Image: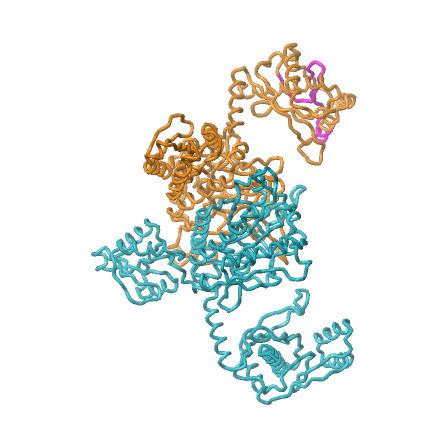
Chain colours: A orange, B cyan
């Protein structure tokens, strides 16, 4: 058995130990389910009172005692009928429901595991005895609510999460990573730096970009807009709603409706918030008859769109209901597909380098799996487009993994993958080949013989969804963004406002006039306190000015995260910082 | 009787003459209504066949004959009962319905007018006889559909529009203005120049900005964003939807709901497409407790929003369902209101100057009227804010008209007015004083004594709604935009592609590298045809290159609308055009 499976058994067994500990604390506890998950486990309970964080160390102590006592995990195979009888007597309503579910699936026997007094309906496997768990390598981490069977209509149970490892060192490493991730949490830093804010009166999952976040976003958006223009993209602006007809043509109404917002009826038409930009840009293409001479056409847009997410799953900028995608559709002749795709890969690499993420990413070829109902039905096109994708990735000399079942419903894609601060893999950017939409939307071009042909379409992003990318950047840099993205690039700090305030203001104005985002902090606080505040705000440069600096047209520069000061002429500093901003250091 | 009333009588009488002419052509015609309108009249008919444009001159001839015959307009006062009998006999169902409506309003007698064989239910007044109409000063202009009583559930009738004036000269002037307006129609030019496109699959009133329009829009947006930044505005980005709660707090749900899109239910919350940005930016303000030291706070956003319009009233970019407002809210202490408002007036003047419209505009102080139900109920605040507005406009030395009843429901406003190419007055930009929302949204700041106070809010735009402003600019400049806004600023035209194509490309690349929007037209068409195409596209500069130019690193420049050519070194031209772009000439 592989190590992973051993760990899974360890974690699942630890969940049973937790349940046994809860039973000691609450003899009337009713038990839901308690599976192993990544790094640990959870267990859902229906308890006579709400748990408080202080309960966790008490439960941990009880778990350690159970481990020390080294109780066996006794498995018993019994008839469903007997099991039902046992759990009815114990008043375990949730287990009864689970057994009835098993009976519906024609199960005659079920297995139960006993650990000291705790009996659980469970198919295992488990360790031999509780003593095999390392008491020093486990920790209960948090309490949350969870609906029975994840259904909002059911009762909400209390869920306890824990982690368990083979040894203390692994636990320590995990906890340290989590602590660091907690410090880097983009929701926390986003609030501290005044980047964004979520107000329930507007809506969960609908972030408001505050002024400092808005500057960062504007900088990022203009950067990618200008880069796209340089590379021959043309811009469009299209509305965030569209007639439902568009999504009936695209197939989204059939395959994706549950992820879309409800339709709005106006006069005799139904409109819906768009979940993607494709049909809007396709309509622009269709406004004119295009010739092969015009292709490829690259339409780019910073496109706002809306997709439904369960409110419980929303999180800061990372998981939202409405977002803005740096989107584009390249419409080209089939023989141009390869070169255009390579061009996109080059742009993506360039963008990620500018963001300081190029070393962190890897590629995934996301293909379809065997569940055909999930995908548009055209075997031949799927074969062709998957083949094209793999050929292009090889040609680009890109190393990639293969993700079976990760394709979009309308085509295969190349995903750019990255690990977040929690160590979890995320998709940052997607490039898709679409041999399908041209047919659905009846898009054509006239070839050099005057015949109408179907173009091929690439759906692509170059920096991904603005919200998620910024969430990622906040955590990756712990708020200390590369200088070109920093909302405030330099703050001027007069040693005394009274004496050097005027000079400090003059320095600030000079920086602003050259396009540097500068602030002046001339509040009455001590210099030390103002430096510390600027450090908290992760401002790249603090420019301290006093008598000496004033007389020499200079500033004493202190870099973010570096305590030593360096005196420089103001003009010299302007040159230095401008170079760093332009160089995207 | 004033001239205007004389004209109204003339036009209404001409409508009767039209009806009499239609009766000659279609003895079974049923008649709807036929009032005088601005510049002319219309009449609605239920006819046995659909009218075609060729019918209009025939009808005009018949009208002229009726005028020449000089029939009297005979008025007769008869009982409603007799009138009903008459129109029943004549099969005039619509007139019967109108008489019944009058009976419901307790009318006993009605008046009818007879003109030769045509009898109409009409309260008049009319001219004495048809001969008083100037047959040379009338014209039937168009045919359209119109629901009986403007209700979609009723039958659609055929409406004939006409214009009528006192003399031939006035008609000629009007027709010339309409012809010019028709040439400048932004829908026509927008399509010709590839600026925007409306596709019914996306939705009426939901324009798609095509690449050339998108460049213009991006240029305009970046211009105003940067100008706002210079003037101490901070940016926000907020979502296009919000919880319905926001609009219950703001009062829009009560006063403005019919103009909003239908709500969308998600889980247990209701969301709606926003009709304005205010509540979103207010929530950003409320995210933190602000001190008087931070005020004024100026939050700006290019904010997309949605308001319902009847589909029949939609028109290109000028009348839309979804639009983007160059919006801002200035939140300040009451004592800062005046200065802030003056600052806005200064910005508006600056922006309009950059757009080349500063000479065309005038101001209107839009105040409330006596229909109190239309406005938020707070007499004292209304008095105060109207007084403030007038005081500030006086202080700014701005000449203004007063628009009684033109206020927003939540406060008075200064409107920037302009005449469109049809000679009609439009509101381009609005600045509002709002002494109300701070209370409703519980917005506060802490004053210098540590007490919480209510701020005052200015809602303002500086270039208005992007869609409408661009519609206006297209018509105002007939597509020949100021150079800084032109989608293509220069086109390079090699005399022969074969011989000078490489040099032409080099010139184009050089222009693009310096930030000029340049194109190359090296198609096989003759130079004359390519110049004519560039003129149609209203490109400011055409750069012709041949042997002489290639050998001298120069270009032969031809300006838009100017046939003479001037030869210039490429570098010299770059300097010249950059200066013009920067100077916003």
Left or right: A584, with B170 as reference point: left
Q: On screen, B526 above or below A74?
A: below
Locate the C terminus of chain B by quadrant: bottom left
Give the magenta part as a residue range: A100-126
Residue lying farthest top? A69
Residue lying farthest front? A498
Q: Nearer the viewer, residue A62 or B358?
A: B358
Q: Nearer the viewer, residue B573 or A513?
A: A513
Query: Is residue A103 magenta-colored?
Result: yes
Q: Nearer the viewer, residue A461 or A180?
A: A180
Locate the N terminus of chain B by quadrant: bottom right
Query: Is residue A559 magenta-colored?
Result: no
Q: On screen, B448 above or below B154?
A: above
Percent position (x, y) of residue A129? 63, 13
Percent position (x, y) of residue A150? 66, 33
Q: Quadrant of residue A159?
A: top right
Q: Quadrant of residue B239?
A: top right
Percent position (x, y) of residue A63? 65, 15
Residue lying farthest bottom? B69
Query: Is residue B367 in view from this perspective?
Result: yes
Left or right: B483, with A88 as reference point: left
Q: Residue at x 36, y 53 (%)?
A: B582
Q: On screen, B357 above or below A566?
A: below
Q: Quadrant of residue A13?
A: top right
């Amino acid at each position: 058995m592989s190590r992973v499976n051993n760990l899974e058994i360890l974690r699942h067994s630890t969940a049973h130990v937790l349940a046994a500990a809860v039973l000691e604390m609450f003899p009337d506890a009713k038990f839901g389910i308690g599976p192993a998950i990544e790094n640990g486990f959870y267990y859902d309970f229906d308890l006579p009172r709400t748990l408080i964080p202080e309960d966790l160390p008490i439960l941990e102590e009880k778990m350690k005692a159970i481990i020390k006592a080294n109780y066996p995990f006794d498995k018993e195979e019994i008839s469903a009928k007997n099991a039902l009888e046992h759990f009815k007597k114990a008043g375990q309503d949730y287990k009864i429901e689970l057994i009835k579910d098993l009976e519906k699936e024609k199960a005659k026997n079920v297995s139960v595991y006993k650990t000291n007094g705790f009996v659980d309906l469970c198919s295992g496997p488990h360790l031999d005895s509780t003593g095999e768990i390392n008491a020093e390598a486990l920790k209960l981490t948090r309490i949350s609510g969870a609906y029975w069977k994840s259904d909002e209509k059911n009762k909400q149970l209390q869920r306890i999460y824990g982690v368990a490892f083979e040894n203390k060192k692994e636990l320590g490493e995990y906890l340290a990573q989590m602590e660091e991730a907690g410090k880097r949490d983009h929701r926390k830093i986003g609030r501290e730096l005044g980047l964004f804010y979520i107000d329930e009166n507007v809506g969960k999952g609908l972030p408001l970009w505050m002024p400092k976040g808005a500057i960062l976003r504007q900088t990022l958006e203009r950067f990618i807009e200008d880069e796209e223009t340089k590379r021959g993209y043309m811009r469009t602006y299209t509305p965030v709603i569209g007639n439902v007809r568009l999504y009936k043509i695209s197939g989204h109404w059939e395959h994706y409706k549950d992820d879309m917002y409800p339709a709005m009826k106006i006069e005799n038409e139904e409109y819906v918030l768009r979940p993607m930009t494709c049909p809007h840009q396709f309509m622009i293409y269709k406004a004119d008859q295009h010739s092969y001479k015009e292709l490829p056409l690259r339409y780019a847009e910073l496109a706002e769109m809306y997709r439904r997410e369960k409110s419980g799953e929303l999180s800061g900028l990372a998981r939202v209901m409405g977002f803005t995608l740096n989107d584009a559709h390249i419409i080209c002749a089939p023989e141009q597909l390869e070169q255009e795709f390579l061009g996109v890969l080059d742009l993506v690499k360039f963008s990620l380098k500018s963001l300081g993420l190029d070393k962190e990413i890897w590629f995934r070829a996301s293909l379809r799996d065997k569940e055909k109902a999930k995908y548009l039905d055209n075997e031949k096109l799927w074969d062709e487009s998957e083949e094209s994708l793999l050929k292009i990735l090889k040609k680009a000399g890109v190393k990639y993994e293969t993700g079976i079942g990760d394709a979009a419903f309308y085509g295969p894609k190349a995903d750019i993958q990255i690990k977040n601060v929690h160590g979890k893999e995320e998709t940052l950017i997607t490039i898709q080949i679409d041999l399908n939409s041209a047919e659905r939307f009846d898009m054509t071009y006239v070839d050099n013989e005057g015949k109408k042909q179907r173009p091929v379409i690439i759906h692509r992003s170059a920096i991904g969804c603005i919200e998620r990318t910024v969430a990622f950047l906040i955590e990756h840099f712990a708020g200390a963004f590369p200088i070109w993205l920093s909302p405030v690039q330099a703050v001027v700090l007069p040693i005394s406002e009274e004496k050097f305030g005027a000079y400090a203001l003059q320095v600030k104005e000079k920086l602003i006039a050259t396009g540097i985002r500068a602030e002046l902090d001339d509040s009455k606080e001590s210099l030390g306190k103002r430096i510390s505040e600027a450090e908290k705000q992760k401002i790249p440069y603090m420019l301290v000015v006093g008598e000496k600096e004033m007389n020499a047209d200079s500033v004493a520069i202190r870099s973010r995260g570096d305590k030593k000061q360096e005196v420089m002429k103001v003009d010299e500093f302007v040159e230095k910082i401008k170079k760093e901003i332009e160089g995207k250091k």
